[in-house]
């Protein structure tokens, strides 16, 4: 199998939605030496069946202690939410809003942000913090991954200070343009430079696993199946 199985991002993301899950992609990354590509397990889908796949639009958050600060040496400090609205409005089709940097004292995502992201064709949101407006996001069916639900507002507690810059979550570097893939088992980051090799290997493994499952269901032992297929 080669990249001809997909011609562009739309084709790749559709293929991932149909055939892949995070475990198999993670297995391939392990084999290729990418051993620390999962975000921490505290980041979970709002609903168990939500899946996110798209390119990261990275957002850098920072704690603050007032909604507006004046006088200030940084004009961002005088803006409610900092650059959050600019970042949100900059989302492109099939991008994922990925936010990190602040402490988990407030919500980083909500219903109105989801509505705007949907209008722009974004693929989802992944935040290292909380979301709020849970019922509204569920009604919109927008794939959202977070530490949980917590209504405390970002306004006087945090600001977006930059976006489309490298960010880190527990030492995992995320660059804008990397592919973010999440399901009920976790969220992983696929580095742009290795995405073709990773997804090619993952699709081959996923298709092979179907053969293993069929063989086991027909009575083959796990040991024999591993010897024959090299997959388990």
Image (tube, helix red, strand yellow):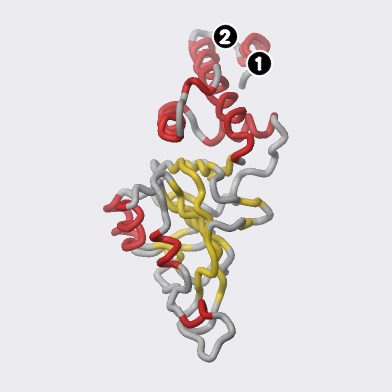
Q: Nearer the viewer, residue 16 or 191?
A: 191
Question: Which mark identifies residue 57?
Answer: none
Pointer 1 and pointer 2: residues touching (CB < 8 Å)? Answer: no
Can you give x and y, in whole percent of width and height, for residue 179 in the image?
53, 42
Can you give x and y, in whole percent of width and height, for residue 151 in the image?
40, 70
The answer to whether 71 appears left or right of 223 in the picture is: left
Q: Nearer the viewer, residue 223 or 132?
A: 132
Q: Which residue matches tag 1?
A: 230
Where disc 1 sits, the SS reads loop
- Taking the spot 68% from the left edge, 54% from the top edge, the residue there is 171
Q: Cα distance, mark 1 to mark 2?
A: 14 Å
Closer to the observer: label 1 or label 2? Answer: 1
Q: Which residue matches tag 2?
A: 220
The answer to whether 97 appears left or right of 196 in the picture is: left
The answer to whether 31 appears left or right of 182 in the picture is: right
- Taking the spot 51% from the left edge, 49% from the top edge, the residue there is 56
> Label 1 neighbourhood size at 10 Å, few (<14), some (14-19), many (20+)?
few
- Taking the spot 56% from the left edge, 29% from the top edge, the residue there is 199
Q: Is residue 166 above or below residue 192?
A: below
Mark 1 vs mark 2: which is more N-terminal? 2
**Quadrant where the C terminus is found in the figure:** top right
Question: Extreme right residue here?
Answer: 33
Can you give x and y, in whole percent of width and height, for residue 192 in the image?
59, 40
Can you give x and y, in whole percent of width and height, for residue 164 in the image?
54, 57
């Amino acid at each position: 199998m080669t990249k001809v199985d997909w011609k562009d991002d739309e084709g790749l993301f559709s293929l991932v939605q149909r055939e892949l899950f995070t475990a198999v992609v993670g297995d391939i990354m392990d084999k290729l030496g990418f051993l620390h590509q999962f975000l921490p397990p505290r980041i979970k889908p709002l609903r168990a069946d939500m899946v996110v796949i798209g390119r990261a639009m990275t957002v850098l958050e920072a704690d603050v202690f007032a909604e507006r600060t004046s006088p200030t040496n940084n004009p961002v400090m005088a803006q409610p939410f900092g650059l959050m609205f600019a970042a949100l409005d900059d989302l492109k089709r099939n991008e994922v809003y990925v936010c990190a940097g602040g402490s988990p004292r407030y919500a980083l995502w909500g219903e109105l942000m989801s509505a705007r992201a949907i209008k722009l064709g974004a693929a989802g949101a992944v935040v290292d913090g909380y979301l709020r407006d849970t019922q509204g996001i569920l009604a919109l069916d927008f794939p959202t991954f977070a530490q949980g639900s917590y209504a405390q507002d970002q306004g006087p507690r945090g600001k977006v200070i930059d976006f489309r810059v490298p960010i880190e979550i527990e030492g995992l570097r995320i660059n804008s343009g990397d592919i973010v893939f999440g399901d009920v088992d976790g969220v992983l980051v696929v580095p742009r430079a290795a995405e073709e090799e990773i997804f090619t290997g993952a699709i081959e493994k996923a298709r092979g696993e179907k053969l293993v499952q069929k063989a086991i269901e027909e009575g083959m032992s796990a040991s024999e199946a591993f010897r024959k297929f090299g997959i388990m």
